[in-house]
């Protein structure tokens, strides 16, 4: 990442729990051009900062919905539950490096991976103390699916915590991130025939969906983590794979504009919205 990005990462890491800083340091560097080699450490730290709003209590049982291939929120959650806590990490199909990275963190004994669909959780009612979904809402496919997942989370736990990036930019680097990210849903639909990485929802819309799922929202807010965020990037070749005609030329033009912004300004995390709710 840029020198400025390194300064911000180091400053944020120094202000974190020293024990968690040790965990971050165990994360391997990743060679995944054009991402900086420490992108994984930066993203794990970002999840840790967001999860401070969740008030995870040590020695509790927590469900994570949508762990993802890199365990980005799994690792800070496993740290937060402590040595006597338990984290159930649910993922349907994107396991990737999950096991390798959880073991590298030194926290594997606290993590119990679960394979399944979040719309039908393999858990009894009130079987966990807290259910969370951190930066996974955009992968749920539709607002209808979001409501189904939130409803199931509220069945499994008396308290849920939801967080996702917001469609807000307060700097050129955040605008560069949104310019590239906002292409993903449309490009994936054109190339794969399905929606993924949905456009970020405004916070009031996320609150409304949680309420429609049967939740009573007791707290909400947003925070600016002030960290680089390069994961919106995808190669031009993915847009070029769209058949000629239709939206291809427009998406190629927008990709070029977004890439020029990325090269000029870098890309930062937009503000992150969060809500806390209980079963109504």
Image (cartoon, rainbow, N blue to C red):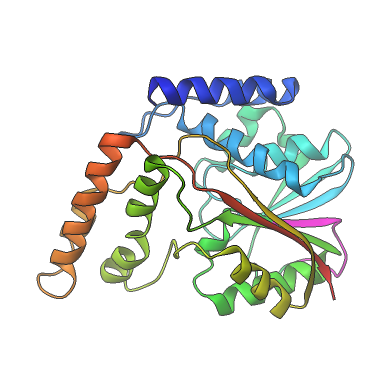
Magenta stretch contains residue 130:
yes
State the residue at coordinates (29%, 64%): 187
Do we see residue 234 in this rendering? yes
**Quadrant where the image shows the N terminus:** top left
Q: Which residues are magenta?
A: 122-132
Q: Position of residue 196 (x, y in %)?
A: 42, 65
**Quadrant where the image shows the C terminus:** bottom right
State the residue at coordinates (52%, 58%): 93
Nearest the eye: 59 or 247? 247
Nearest the eye: 66 or 158? 158
User: Residue 81 sits in which quadrant?
Assistant: top right
Nearest the eye: 118 or 161? 161
Task: Indicate left or right for 5 with 72 as reference.
Answer: left
Task: Indicate left or right for 142 with 241 as reference.
Answer: right
State the residue at coordinates (32%, 70%): 189
Q: Position of residue 66 (x, y in %)?
A: 60, 56
State the residue at coordinates (43%, 23%): 4
User: Residue 107 sits in which quadrant?
Assistant: top right
In the rendered image, the vertical position of residue 112 relative to residue 125, given as above or below: above
Q: Position of residue 226 (x, y in %)?
A: 54, 35
In the rendered image, the vertical position of residue 163 relative to residue 72, given as above or below: below
Q: Position of residue 238 (x, y in %)?
A: 23, 56
Magenta stretch contains residue 48:
no
């Amino acid at each position: 990442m840029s020198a400025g990005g390194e300064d911000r990462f180091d400053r944020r890491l120094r202000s974190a729990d020293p024990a968690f800083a040790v965990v971050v340091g165990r994360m391997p560097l990743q060679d995944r051009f054009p991402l900086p080699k420490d992108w994984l450490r930066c993203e794990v730290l970002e999840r840790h900062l967001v999860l401070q709003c969740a008030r995870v209590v040590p020695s509790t049982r927590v469900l994570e919905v949508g762990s993802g291939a890199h365990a980005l929120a799994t690792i800070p959650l496993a740290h937060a539950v402590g040595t006597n806590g338990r984290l159930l990490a649910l993922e349907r199909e994107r396991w990737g490096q999950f096991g390798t990275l959880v073991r590298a963190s030194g926290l594997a004994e606290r993590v119990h991976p679960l394979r399944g669909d979040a719309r039908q959780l393999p858990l009894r009612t009130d079987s966990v103390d807290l259910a969370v979904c951190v930066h996974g809402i955009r992968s749920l496919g539709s607002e209808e699916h979001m409501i189904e997942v939130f409803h199931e989370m509220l069945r499994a736990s008396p308290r849920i915590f939801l967080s996702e990036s917001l469609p807000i930019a307060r700097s050129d680097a955040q605008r560069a991130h949104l310019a590239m990210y906002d292409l993903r849903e449309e490009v994936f639909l054109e190339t794969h025939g399905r929606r993924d990485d949905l456009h970020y929802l405004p916070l009031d819309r996320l609150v409304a969906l949680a309420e429609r799922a049967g939740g009573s929202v007791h707290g909400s807010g947003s925070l600016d983590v002030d960290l680089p965020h390069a994961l919106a990037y995808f190669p031009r070749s993915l847009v070029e794979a769209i058949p000629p005609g239709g939206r291809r030329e427009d998406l190629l033009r927008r990709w070029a504009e977004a890439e020029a912004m990325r090269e000029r300004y870098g890309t930062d995390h937009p503000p992150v919205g969060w809500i806390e709710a209980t079963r109504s």
